[in-house]
Image (tube, helix red, strand yellow):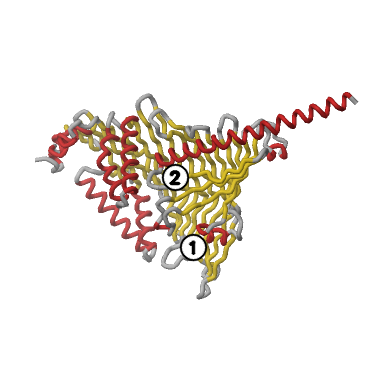
Amino acid sequence: MKKSLVAVSIVVALGAVWTGASWYTGKKLEDRLDSFVKKANTELDKSFPESGIEWQAKDFKRGIFSSDVRLILTIKNGVKNADIPPNEEIILKSTIDHGPFPMTNLKAFNLIPQMASIHAELEKNDALKTLFNFTNEKSLFNLDAKVSYGRSLSANIDLIPINHTETKENGDQRVLSFSGAKISADINHDLSELSFTVKSDELSFSDPIKKETIALKDIDFKSDNKKGKFDIYTGDQRYSIGEFSMNGIPNEPNVSLKGIKVTSNLGEDKDNLNIKIAYSIDGVKIKDIDFGSGKLALGMEKLDGQSARKFTQAYNDAAKEALATNEASDDMTSLAILSNLHLLLNNNPQFSISPFSWKNSKGESSVDFKLSLQNIPEDKSALQLMEPEEMVRTLIQELSLHVNVPKAMLIESIAQSAMLDGKDKATAEAQAEQQVNMITLGGVKYKILTDKDGIIGLNFHYANDKVKLNNQESNLHQFLLDNGLVE
C-alpha cells in the first residue's frame, strides 16, 4: 500500500512539475514571441525597405499546455502590380504546444526538451478568397516549427498540391497544376544566421483545348546565410530548375531550357567583401533547333566592406523616403544608387567575367575579362574634367580581355538565329559565313582581331602605362593616339 502511495505521489508530482513548467513556458513564450516579431520586422526593414511589410502577433490566448495566436503579415503599402490594396492582411492561425515536452513531440516519441512546437495554417479572409478557391478551401500550406530554449527556430512547410481549372465564357480553359513543395528553414534567436531549402517537382499553366503550356520542373533552391561584420548577410545560395518549357503559345516559338543553375557566394575578410556568381544552362532548344549550352561566372573582389554597408544604407534610406512621401520609388532609389555608386569603388576593387562561354555542335567560344580599379579621387568632380588618358591612369590599375571564338561555331549560331526568322538552312548558313568572314577581315585589317587555325581571337592587356593588343605593344598614349581616342 505504501509503495503504491509513493508511486502515485511521484506521478502526481511529475504531473504538477510538467503542468507548472508548461504554464511557465507559455508565459515566457508570449514575451519572446513579441521580441522575435520585432527583430524580424527590423531585419525586413533593413533588407527590404521598399516592401512595406510588417509582422504582428495578436490575440494570444495562453493555456496550460498550449496557446493560440494569430500571426498577421500586413502589406502596409499594397502592391499595385498584384492588385493588393494598402494594409492588406495575411493571417496565420497558430497553435503552440508548450515545452519542455510539447505534445506533438511526445506523439512522435521525441523526448528532446524544447520551448515550443508550433503548427500554423492560413486563415481565410477577403484578401485570400481567390487563393482558397484555387486550393478547394484548404490552407495553401501547413507549417510545423520547433523553438528551442536557445530561441532558435526550425520550420518545415508543406505547400499542398493544386490542380485548378478555370473555364472562361468563350470556352477557353486555364489549368494551374502544382505538385506541391517542401520548404525547410532554420533561424537562430537573433536572425544573424538563417538557412532554407525549397524543393518542388513541377509547376505548370496550360490550356488543354488549345494545347498551350508553360511549365517548370525540378525546382530546387538552397541558401545558407549569416550576418557578417559589415551588417550584411554573407553565405552561399544555389538555385536550379531542371527544365523550363513553353509550347503552343500564340506568336511565340516553342522553347525548352534545361539545367538552369545559379550559384552565388558572398564572403568577407578583414576589410572587404568578395562576391562570386555563376550562371549555367545545359541546353537551349527553340523551334526544335539546338542552340547549345553556356556558362557565365562573375566576380567582384575587394569591395570595401564599410563602403558597401554605407551604400546599402543609402539605398535603404532612399527606399523608405520614397514610400513615406508617396514619390516614385524607382526614380528615388535609382538616384540613390547613382549618387553613392562611388562608395563601391574604394579600396582597389576587382571585377571579372571568367569565363563567359557558349558551346554548340561546331565548337565552344570563350571570353575572359578582368579589371582592377584604383581608389577614386576624394574630389569626385575632378573626374569630369579629366581627359581620357588621365582618367585611365587615375582609375584603372590593370585590365585584360581575352576572346576566342571558333569561326564555325559563330557561323552556326548566326545561321540558327536566321532560321528562327524563317530562312532555309542553306541560305542562312551561306549568309552567316559571309558575315563572319567580313567581320574577321575587318578586324584583322585594323589589327583588333586575329585569325588563326579557324579561331577569331582578341587579346588585350593594360597595366603600368603599357598596352599589349594581340602581339603589338605600345605605351598608353601611343595606343590612344593610334585609335583616334586622343589628339
Query: What's the residue type where badge 2 is placed?
Result: Ser
Q: SS of the residue at dot 1? A: strand
As drawn, 229 above or below 116 = above
- Pointer 1 or 2: first along the chain: 1
As drawn, 408 above or below 134 = above
Residue in the foreground of this view, choosing between 380 and 72: 72
Q: Which mark is residue 193?
A: none
Residue 383 position by quadrant = top left
Using residue 330 as the reference point, say whether residue 477 is left or right of it: left
Using residue 368 as the reference point, say whether residue 339 is left or right of it: left
Q: Position of residue 38 (x, y in %)?
A: 47, 38
Q: Residues within 10 Å of mark 1 (few under 14, many from 20)?
A: some
Name the residue carrying label 1.
247
As drawn, 211 above or below 215 = below
Name the residue carrying label 2.
280
Query: Residue 479: in sight, yes or no?
Result: no
Distance of mark 1 from mark 2, alpha carbons?
22 Å
